[in-house]
Image: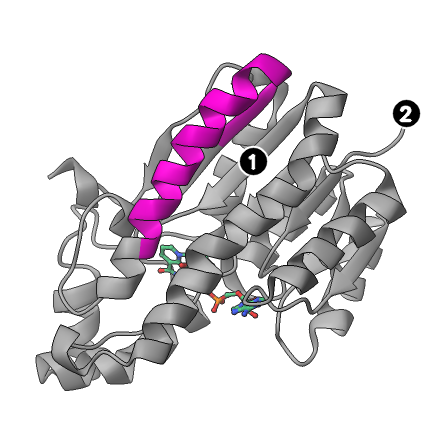
């Protein structure tokens, strides 16, 4: 039987990389994407370790033409994409009055519009197959807000709305669409915002971790990349065939409050 294929954006770092490893371990072919300079090497080592086939593309999620080319390349190589995981994302932390317009556009582009462009490009093949799984990596910030993250919170709320809409459109065709909403996970996106958080809150690094990152979670621990990866594997499984349109928090109880 032919291996299934998963396409994961932003899969050469952090959460996306952990998702790629988990799906590779289950025998999926992997379509890697990301902007890391050593992305091609990372992709090869993950695929080789699991003995699965793969391609790597540095397609920029800000460029709709490059996104469509990524979808075409994946379909040309593997014939189908059974699972699409829109994961690439960036963050920027600033009070509204200082928030740079270019950062707003980039966050909306990468964290929201890219999911629209890529899902639209893969959608006809999922419909033709009468099967598909779309998993969007949103955030606890898709469900609740924090100050100084206007663009990110807007993009992630939008991503959850997009996911619900395509869940309805995909239902007659065996396609499910769900969001995963992580709380804080210790990855480069979190490391990069520590100096910005120190500045806007006038805090030390230790205070940012305790009072900004973990304060809102009932469980005072970072969520792991593996917990997000295993959630994605479950949503991709046949056992999840009637789970669609949900936003699954993996957030230490943050959004329970
Ligand atoms: P990360 O910085 O480790 O990974 C982000 C990935 O996206 C990288 O591979 C990067 O190259 C890629 N990327 C960024 N801009 C891109 C672009 N223009 N084109 C193509 N690829 C691009 O961060 P992460 O924590 O693994 O984040 C993954 C997703 O999880 C993001 O959508 C993020 O918003 C979400 N998330 C993260 C956390 C957290 O605490 N880490 C919490 C909630 C949600």
The residue at which mark 2 appears reads as 1
The residue at which mark 1 appears reads as 134
Q: Is residue 3 visible?
A: yes
**Does the segment drawn in magenta span residue 233?**
no
| Residue occupying the point 89% across, 30% down | 2
| Residue occupying the point 53% across, 45% down | 229
How busy is the neighbourhood of tag 2: few (under 14 within 10 Å), some, or many (20 plus)? Answer: few
Q: Is residue 73 above or below residue 229?
A: below
Q: Residue 176: which quarter of the image? A: top right
Tell me the mark number nearer the camera, choosing from 2 and 1. Answer: 1
Highlighted range, magenta: 155-177
Give the overall secondary structure of the magenta segment. Answer: helix
Q: Position of residue 81 (x, y in %)?
A: 74, 38
In this view, the residue in front, 83 or 65, is 65
Left or right of 194 on screen, residue 64: right
Q: Position of residue 197 (x, y in %)?
A: 20, 78
């Amino acid at each position: 039987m032919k291996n299934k294929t998963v396409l994961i954006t932003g899969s050469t770092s952090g959460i996306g990389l952990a998702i790629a490893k988990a799906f590779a371990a289950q025998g999926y072919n992997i379509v890697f994407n990301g902007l890391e300079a050593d992305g091609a090497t990372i992709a090869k080592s993950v695929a080789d370790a699991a003995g699965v086939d793969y391609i790597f593309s540095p397609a920029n999620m800000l460029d709709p033409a490059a996104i469509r080319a990524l979808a075409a390349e994946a379909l040309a190589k593997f014939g189908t994409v059974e699972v699409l995981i829109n994961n690439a994302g960036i963050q920027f932390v600033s009070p509204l009055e200082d928030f740079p317009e270019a950062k707003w556009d980039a966050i909306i582009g990468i964290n929201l519009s890219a999911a629209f462009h890529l899902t639209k490009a893969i959608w006809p093949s999922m419909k033709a197959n009468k099967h598909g799984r779309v998993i969007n990596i949103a955030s606890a910030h898709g469900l609740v807000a924090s100050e100084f993250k206007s663009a990110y919170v807007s993009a992630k709320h939008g991503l959850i709305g997009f996911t619900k809409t395509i869940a309805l459109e995909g239902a007659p065709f065996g396609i499910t669409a769900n969001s995963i909403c992580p709380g804080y996970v210790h990855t480069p996106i979190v490391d990069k915002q520590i100096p910005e958080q120190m500045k806007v809150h006038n805090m030390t690094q230790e205070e940012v971790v305790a009072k900004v990152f973990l304060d809102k979670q009932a469980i005072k621990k970072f969520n792991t990349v593996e917990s997000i990866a295993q959630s994605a594997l479950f949503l991709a499984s046949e056992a999840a065939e009637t789970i669609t349109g949900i936003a699954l928090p993996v957030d230490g109880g943050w959004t329970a409050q």
